Amino acid sequence: MSQERRMSLVEAIANVVVGYGVALATQFAVFPLVGIEAQHRQMVLTGLAFMAVSLVRSYALRRLFDRWTAKGA
């Protein structure tokens, strides 16, 4: 059974939003430990840029694997 495009997008968004939260918390914890100095705004904006790329990547991969699964069924 294949996943609808809408649900693929919902799954990709949920995955990326959770990942963004984890990544941001990790940045705030790890950057000072390794000597990286960045303002909070810089970390948030950088994270948002990576989140956008991650969302496109996640959705595209989900659709690709769904297509492969549908062809094999």
Image (cartoon, grey):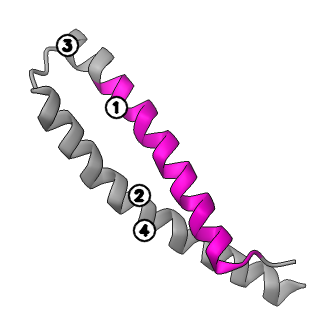
Residue under the image location 41 percent in, 41 percent down = 20
Q: Which mark is residue 56?
A: 4
In space, the residues marked 2 and 3 are separated at their CA atoms by: 25 Å
Instruction: Reply above or below: 36 against 14.
Output: above
Q: Residues within 10 Å of mark 3 (few under 14, many from 20)?
A: few
In space, the residues marked 3 and 4 are separated at their CA atoms by: 30 Å
Q: How far across and down, in percent of the image, does residue 62 sit? A: 62, 69
Residue under the image location 48 percent in, 41 percent down = 19
> Which badge, 3 or 1, is on the more N-terminal residue?
1
Asked if the magenta segment contains residue 29, the reply would be: no
In space, the residues marked 4 and 1 are separated at their CA atoms by: 19 Å
Residue under the image location 24 percent in, 10 percent down = 33
Q: How far across and down, in percent of the image, does residue 56 sit? A: 42, 68
**Which residue carries the number 1 mark?**
24
- The amino acid on which the numbered mark 2 sits, given as a three-letter code, is Ser
Label 1 SS: helix
In space, the residues marked 1 and 2 are separated at their CA atoms by: 14 Å
> Which badge, 2 or 3, is on the more N-terminal residue?
3
Instruction: Reply above or below: 30 against 21.
Output: above
**Stretch in magenta:** 3-27
Residue under the image location 28 percent in, 43 percent down = 47
> Which badge, 3 or 4, is on the more N-terminal residue?
3
Q: Residues within 10 Å of mark 1 (few under 14, many from 20)?
A: some
**Which residue carries the number 2 mark?**
54
Image quarter (top left, top right, bottom left or bottom right) of the N terminus: bottom right
- The amino acid on which the numbered mark 1 sits, given as a three-letter code, is Leu
Task: Considering the whole magenta stretch, tell me its main secondary structure.
Answer: helix
In space, the residues marked 3 and 1 are separated at their CA atoms by: 13 Å
Q: Which mark is residue 32?
A: 3
Label 4 SS: helix
> Which badge, 4 or 1, is on the more N-terminal residue?
1
Please identify the residue farthest to the top as the structure is shown.
33
